[in-house]
Image (cartoon, rainbow, N blue to C red):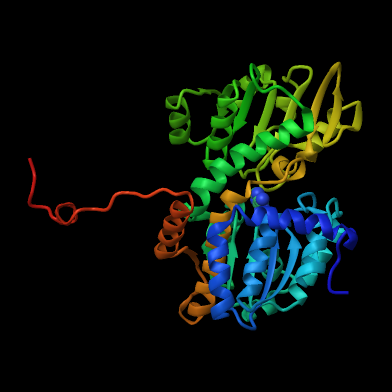
Amino acid sequence: MTYDVKDIKLAVGGKKRIEWAEKDMPVLGLIKKRFEREKTLRGIKISACLHVTAETANLIRTIKAGGADVLLCASNPLSTQDDVAASLAKDYGIKVYAIKGEDRKKYYSHLKTAVNFRPQVTMDDGADLLSLLHTTYKSQAKEILGSMEETTTGVIRLKSLEREKKLLVPIIAVNDAKTKNLFDNRYGTGQSTLDGIIRATGMLIAGKTVVTAGYGWCGRGFAMRARGMGAKVIITEVNKIKSLEAAMDGFEVMPMREAAKIGDLFCTLTGDIGVIRGEHFKLMKDGAFVCNSGHFDVEIDIPALKKMSKKINKNINENVDEYVVGKKRIYLLGEGRLINLAAAEGHPASVMDMSFSTQVLSTEFVVKNHQKLEKKVYNVPEEIENWIADLKLKSMGISIDKLTSEQEKYLRSWEIGT
Ligand code: ADE
């Protein structure tokens, strides 16, 4: 069997969803047309470990159009859109291994299938695939021409491998491209995280005290959108500059132990472990909602919450578990996994258009330049970013000014002063 999906009969709905997303991905569409002509990825075997969504389906179709042989597995057990997975397998002939709600064993067996495919190029969202290629399947790493990493957490893991001189393949840090993080991390996460929270709880955001842990691009985006919907937003941070920035952006900034007492809704977006712990749960109000929009489910100390709860009512609403702590109820959303993908559909296609165009052009760059690449973490080449920004602007009907020759000369010169 060349796929493992929940139900292949779901393909009809999945195809509609993929085509609906496609209309909001014009830049990726242009690349797909060029790939169909040029076949720059001809014969290249690619394993992609990504969230299996309609937007990812369009990325995979583009890579296939370039001539690659592609396998896709899930980068998170809860983020798969089962109908999309079915359609990718049935309508587009992609090897898909992803089932929403798969347990840890299944998740890793799918990852292993992706490694056993013997890819020459990999794409990761969180570095789980590359992590296998640096441990159990180390001997296979030499077959890899290069790998793309989609998210902050993955880049952090890979940079630590690089620092310890253990990195075995060249990496392109797609996450660090401006065409990715300024838009996907900020506007994508901002909107889709609130979408997930609202779908899970039906809560009115106006008037709530919303505690945002982390003020990176994701935290900034979430805080900005929560404020826009009428919430009082508190930021908790460990970084001094980011804390200052949050304060001057007009947010209240305080430690989690203070925020824990007054928050109605808590959302972690830090990329770190143990951000909301037992000591914080103890201080929370009755009925507090807690969720995570960082990559892994480690930001909220769920084992501690379980330990201190006398009763757990699972799924009292879809994607909501009630933890009874003494006389208080604490509501954990989406089992502490990425709430925007667990309870909603992830970022809108329009923003994934930029992220995935960056992915695809980085893949082409790796295939064309792998002989020159060392075992390092590289940034996405600037020409790729400029090309994507230019086409995205055009697709939005926006034209911008050009430098005059006088301005160009002025910017190059040092002679003209006061
Ligand atoms: N990450 C966040 N949103 C996503 C989406 N819609 N598709 C794939 N990966 C995502």
Residue at screen point 79% across, 20% down: 287
User: Residue 250: x, y in percent?
Assistant: 46, 23
User: Residue 204: x, y in percent?
Assistant: 70, 22
- Tell me the quadrant of the picture where the N terminus can be found: bottom right
User: Residue 30: x, y in percent?
Assistant: 53, 65
User: Residue 71: x, y in percent?
Assistant: 73, 71
| Residue 259 position (above or below residue 220) | above
The residue nearer to you, when weighing 105 against 59, is: 59
The residue nearer to you, when weighing 75 against 34, is: 34
Residue at screen point 62% across, 55% down: 23
Q: Is residue 199 left or right of residue 99?
A: left
Q: Quadrant of residue 29?
A: bottom right
Q: Quadrant of residue 255?
A: top right
The mark total stands at: 0
Residue at screen point 76% across, 55% down: 16
| Residue 269 position (above or below residue 352) | above
- Tell me the quadrant of the picture where the C terminus can be found: top left
The residue nearer to you, when weighing 98 against 337, is: 98
Residue at screen point 80% across, 71% down: 113
Res. 40 in view: no
The residue nearer to you, when weighing 116 against 206, is: 206
| Residue 116 position (above or below residue 91) | below
Q: Is residue 363 left or right of residue 86?
A: left
Res. 258 in view: yes
